[in-house]
């Protein structure tokens, strides 16, 4: 992309309404624009990152054997009356009435709708196990939308639902989700720690929230510091292997790690004192096994091996895709701007032309641009006729991992400058070597 033809409305001033770094930087980098409280337009740069995260989530879900689909944002109230949640959900649900006076709502989640789809088509235990998911906009009328996309009212979420014949099978689905989530967050350059969460009115131990540690996080968390040494890495997982998935769950959840909702001082005290940590975290996902709650209320049964109807065991599993962008920036920025992890960066490399209009500099930039594209990378070429200082500031603000600086002086010596956004280190090299270096 050539910057002269792009739409990147960066702001010089720090917007007064933004209280935390990620919100400030997303506004300044021209990623989002508030449309109304907690509702945002995704400008091209923000939209690009959102799509990258969405793709990672799709890839990892499908790797785990989960099936993508798409349900609508607007739902009929009927299904929610059936499950009993229409009244229980409270003012967070945006209720709408259509021209025929029918009660509708903007979905805050999709348990009811997916259960209805399931019961309409699935008849036999032979069709199980089944996990369906979608990535779709949700609406929750949060009392205090704040921190930009971190607590929006309209937000983008992946939600998946498993249907299994037995509790045992459903727990395998739960474990599979835990494993796939660990991989997902790591690919985004994040450490998200599974923490024991509150089962709410449903109760039970089978729910974990994934938290990214950050001072600006809204949850208070308590954990054994050993847990931060764990990484998923590039281990190969067979998602059908029950024991293997269980072993990962065991490894990642056996140390103390809880949110304030489930925190227990007495149990925490058993962790050696020097390893006890109290911190704040951002909830970027949650997995849940809830048994037959919805299948019972909505009559989702299959014919079991003995011919008798069985209520299916279910779970639901969510990832806050739009919130993740805020979390990634909270964990990856400095006073100049964002520092994108390689896996989610909107462009791989920025090319700064120090003297637009200079024939040699223009030609060198053009050929770098083409060569990088030919390598399958996305360069962002600042070809505008602007001062170098302003170009550098924009590149630092939008945080691409690499910058290649091209100017007449360097070209005389046959070199360009390659700078790492994360370390700030620069190196001079021939243009070919620069192309080689950017991955
Ligand atoms: P929170 O405790 O932050 O209100 P939640 O527990 O109500 O979140 P879930 O129902 O577990 O949210 O939804 C799954 C994921 O969706 C959350 O883990 C979070 O990452 C994301 N999410 C929830 N509410 C919002 C919101 N208002 N804005 C952005 N993302 C959200
Ligand atoms: Mg909530
Ligand atoms: Mg929560
Ligand atoms: Mg939650």
Image (cartoon, helix red, strand yellow):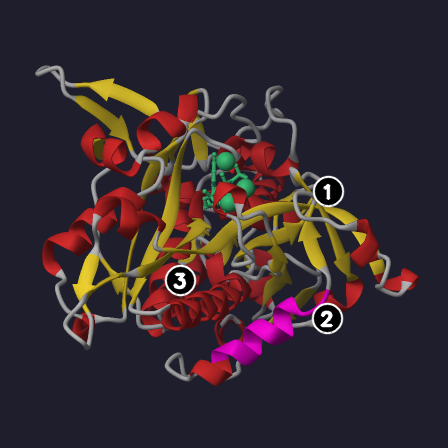
Say which element carries label 1: loop
Residue 195, percent from left and from top: 63, 56
Predominant secondary structure, magenta span: helix
- N-terminal label among 1 and 3: 3
Side (left or right) of 278 relative to 148:
right
Residue 85, percent from left and from top: 34, 33
Side (left or right) of 285 relative to 104:
right
| Of the pair 410 and 69, the residue shown nearer to us | 69
- N-terminal label among 3 and 2: 3
Q: Contact, CB < 8 Å: mark 3 with mark 2?
A: no
Q: Which residue is mark 3?
A: 56
Q: In the rendered structure, find residue 215 and report the number of the disc placed on it.
A: 1
Distance Cα–Cα, label 3 vs label 2: 23 Å
Q: Residue at x 44, y 68 (%)?
A: 171
Q: Residues within 10 Å of mark 1 (few under 14, many from 20)?
A: some
Q: Residue at x 61, y 52 (%)?
A: 211
Q: In the rendered structure, find residue 229 and report the number of the disc placed on it.
A: 2
């Amino acid at each position: 992309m050539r910057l002269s033809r792009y739409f990147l409305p960066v702001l010089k001033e720090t917007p007064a309404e933004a209280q935390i770094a990620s919100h400030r930087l997303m506004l300044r980098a021209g990623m989002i624009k508030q449309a109304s409280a907690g509702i945002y337009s995704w400008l091209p740069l923000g939209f690009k990152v959102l799509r990258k995260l969405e793709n990672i989530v799709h890839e990892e879900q499908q790797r785990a054997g989960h099936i993508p689909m798409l349900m609508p944002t607007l739902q009929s109230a009927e299904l929610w009356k059936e499950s009993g949640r229409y009244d229980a959900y409270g003012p967070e649900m945006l209720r709408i009435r259509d021209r025929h006076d029918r009660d509708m709502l903007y979905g805050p989640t999709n348990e009811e709708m997916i259960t209805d789809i399931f019961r309409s088509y699935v008849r036999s235990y032979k069709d199980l196990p089944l996990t369906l998911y979608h990535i779709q906009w949700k609406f929750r009328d949060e009392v205090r939308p704040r921190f930009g996309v971190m607590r929006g009212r309209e937000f983008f979420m992946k939600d998946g639902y498993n249907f299994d014949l037995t509790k045992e099978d459903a727990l395998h689905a739960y474990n599979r989700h835990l494993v796939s989530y660990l991989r997902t967050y790591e690919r985004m350059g994040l450490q998200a720690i599974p923490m024991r969460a509150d089962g709410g009115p449903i109760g039970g131990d089978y729910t974990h929230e994934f938290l990214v540690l950050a001072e600006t996080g809204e949850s208070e968390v308590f954990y054994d510091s050993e847990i931060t040494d764990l990484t998923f890495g590039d281990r190969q997982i067979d998602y059908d292997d029950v024991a293997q998935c269980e072993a990962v769950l065991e490894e990642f959840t056996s140390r103390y790690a809880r949110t304030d909702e489930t925190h227990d001082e007495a149990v925490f005290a058993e962790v050696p004192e020097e390893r006890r940590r109290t911190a704040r975290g951002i909830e970027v996902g949650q997995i849940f096994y809830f048994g037959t709650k919805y299948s019972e209320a909505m009559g989702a049964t299959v014919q079991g091996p003995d011919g008798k109807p069985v209520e299916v065991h279910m779970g639901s599993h969510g990832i806050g895709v739009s919130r993740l962008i805020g979390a990634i920036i909270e964990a990856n920025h400095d006073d100049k701007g964002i520092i994108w992890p390689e896996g989610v960066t909107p462009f791989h490399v920025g090319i700064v032309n120090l003297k637009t209009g200079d024939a040699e500099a223009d030609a060198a930039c053009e050929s770098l641009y083409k060569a990088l594209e030919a390598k399958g990378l996305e360069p962002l070429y600042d070809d505008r006729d602007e001062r170098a200082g302003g170009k550098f500031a924009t590149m630092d603000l939008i945080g691409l991992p690499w910058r290649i600086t091209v100017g007449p002086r360097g070209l005389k010596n046959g070199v360009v400058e390659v700078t790492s956004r994360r370390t700030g280190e620069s190196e001079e090299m021939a243009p070919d070597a620069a192309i080689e270096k950017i991955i």
